[in-house]
Image: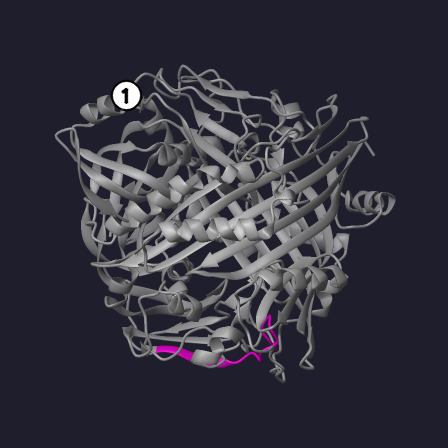
Amino acid sequence: MDWELYELWSKKIGVKVENNKIKVFGGSQSKLYAARVIIDGKVGFASAEDPKNAIEFAKKVAKISNEELDDFPCEKPSKVSGIYDRRVEDITVDYLREEVERLLSSTEKISTAEISHEVSEVRITNSYGCELEERSTFSSLNVEVVIDNGSGYDFFESRSVELRMEEVAKKAEELAKLSAKSKRIERKVSDIILSPYAVHQLFSNTLYPSLSAENVLKGRSRFKIGDYVGNLRIIDDSTIDGGLMSCSFDDEGCAGRRKVIVDENILNFFTDWKTAKIFGCTGNGFRDEATNPPAPSPSNVVLDVKEKCDLDDAIYINYFTGAHTANPVSGDFSYECHNATLNDEPVRMMIYGNVFELLNKLAGKFGEAKQVENTITPALRFKSVKLI
Amino acid sequence: MKFYDIRRLKSESLVLNFENGRLEKPKYVSIKSKAFRVLKNGFWGFFEGDVDDREGLEIAERLAAFEGDSDVLEISSRGDFKLKVKKDPKDISIEEKISLLKDLYTIIRADSVKISYMENKRVFEYVDSCGNECNYEVWRCGVVIFAVAKDKSLQAYSRRLLKVGGFEVIDESYEIAEDVSEVISKLVNAKSPPSGEMNVVLDPSLAGVFIHEAFGHSAEADHVLQSSTVLKSKIGEKIGSEEVDIYDDPTIPEFGFYPFDDEGVRAEKHILVENGILKGFLHSRETAKKLGGNPGNARADGTSFPIVRMSNIYLAPKDWKFDELLEECKSGVYLVGTRGGETDPATGFFQFSAQYGYIIRNAEICEMIRDVSLSGNTLEILRDLKIGNEVKFDPGFCGKAGQYVPVSDGAPHVICKAIVGGA
């Protein structure tokens, strides 16, 4: 029998703010074990609060499984920096109080806000000699502001302890004011510019699923190697200094690495250890929760376009409502936008289309790249998009 | 300290994924956790972790380090509850569960099929400093079917059957498999939808999502306290047509069922809207104390901090037969199934996506359309809603503040006017 044990320990502390007042000061500590075993070539998976139970349950699951795997990886991890900030370990009540005071002094219109600081440690061992562990930190802030009949939301995430209280509060306030004043535009075809946040919302729900090797192999993607995608370069890089998704190794123990997924044409897909046997290893075997088995998922996705563009006569969209309702297989989407501007005037509309057709209308990039969850991108301009 | 409570949770889950004829990524998950809340000087200290009760309360009390205006309604609640199931999932062999998945798989004609069977046992215990003590054991079971096929376009379609109960829940899964097979075969050749403002007939699944997303979230009392709902200050006001009655009822044996909420409050049906008039909000013990109202809707994802949530929210049936709704519509679209939606309770604007639909022409259902969404404003839609005569519930997991809880949304067919768009 071959085996793998994934351990996730985490410690979290944070504050919730409601209606401009501090409401809850909370902490948590957890440890979870997830085991995979290979018996007669079949994989069993189980998760439990202690390693012995996890292994025993995984053995039982393997007896009924058709999931096949030859082995588990044993690779030397990459060197990744900027993902651990010692100061997060020592956060005090006074530090959090000071953070909240800074936040509350930045705007008087906070509906809800949450500050969170987390330390976690992943440990992976397996019967092939893999013994890896990595400690990392993650801090986040999200703020919702309501003004009159408008609402605005902004957030900031970082591997270090510092959070941009004033910047996030001001941005949420600005978006709330926009939303309150926005007027629905007439049906038209227009150039649009998607903010880094809107790009992430759209691509993570429509484009990225089609770049998963598992989805390709199971007929849930339209892509094959060599297909033309558009005037776009997509790099998956889990080794970026301080990247929100950076790691020395993925959730199966494969070394973190930088790989070009799309350079106008499809060059590769995100692979976990199983699909790596077909497409090559990209170190993208991640668990969306510790209690789930690994599957191909992006790490830091860096988007780039050669051409630069300007804002002229384009609608700038800050974020979408209902981003998760897109069709992850066909790439069709239709979203509401309440925080958009056209020549500095606030507007609202529904935008609809297909992401794969939209990529052929990519005109260029605008502004500096910013990381939003797992996407690092500048704002992107698309030509002739249908709006209602 | 003014108040404390302790929750103890044990959860066991089995998930079997049958993908393209093979049992892939089966998993068993066992979770044990505790949560401790302390209210001191009007401020909540909260700790989540598997430690002994004394240590957990000490940590939570240390975290209650600020001063605030939080408070909690005193209640009286004690009891034990064990959901009676007809077929205990523990008594059904894993081979029988796999055999069911194989049977369902043979029904569906598609290029790629994933059928997931899931069972979960939640064992919950609650105690608080007011002397309340309750515990329960509830099973949830179900099947989710996801199919992908290609002809003129590559399309996906899914259905969910999820309820509280034992393995007997699965009995209805054959009908769902047949529906998936039939719909996906047509969807691949369906046309793009029209766009613009038009008459829309929503099937119970999509109408239920409207009631949940557009109305229900706006009726959560924490949003009232946060000044982030269009329903704030509207109690006693007419917010919808006289046909509109909306209730939230955790005692209905659907996916959002619970016997006690995560603050130990015994579950009961709550009236939200009757005859179009807003009668009440959904409450936790804190919002009920501050705003007046009945608690019982504080729920948590695992042992997270409980927040105000829906359970089984539904729009009550009225008199319109389906044919009469089509006649009323005359021309427009009939939208079926849901891929979810999102609403901004502060503004009342919503967006939902249907799984598919049909053009309605001369009060008749005509050609199929795909990837269609609708958007609008909650209060405008409620004002002009016409409601069908049979409620159906659709299950799902509702997300709020990063927490996901099982819910169901119920509604009959309805007709309204909204903005429709699609690729």
Name above or below for residue A33 compared with residue B166.
Answer: below
Which of A86 and A298 lies nearest the eye of the viewer?
Answer: A298
The answer to whether residue B207 is left or right of residue A159 is left
| Residue A166 place in picture, x, y as percent | 56, 55
| Residue A330 place in picture, x, y as percent | 30, 58
| Residue B22 place in picture, x, y as percent | 47, 62
Within-10-Å neighbours for mark 1: few <14, some 14–19, many 20+: some
Residue B40 lies in the magenta stretch? no
Name above or below for residue A259 compared with residue B12.
Answer: below
Element marked by disc 1: loop
Tell me what residue is drawn at x 68 percent, y 27 percent. B265
Q: How many marks?
A: 1
Q: Quadrant of the N terminus of chain B?
A: top right
Main SS category, magenta section: loop
According to the image, what is the colour scheme of the structure?
Answer: one colour
Q: Using the rendered image of the protein, determine whether residue B185 is visible from the camera's viewpoint.
A: yes
Q: Which residue is mark 1?
A: B321
In the image, what residue type sits under mark 1? Lys
Residue A253 lies in the magenta stretch? yes
| Residue B44 place in picture, x, y as percent | 73, 39
Q: Using the rendered image of the protein, determine whether residue A97 is visible from the camera's viewpoint.
A: no
- Farthest residue, direction bottom: A76
Which of B291 and A248 lies nearest the eye of the viewer?
Answer: A248
Tell me what residue is drawn at x 39 percent, y 56 percent. B113
Range of the magenta residues? A248-262
Quadrant for residue A240, please give it.
bottom right
The answer to whether residue B393 is left or right of residue B353 is right
Tell me the subunit letter for badge 1.
Answer: B
- Farthest residue, direction left: B362
The answer to whether residue A305 is left or right of residue A15 is left
Which of B384 and A212 lies nearest the eye of the viewer?
Answer: A212
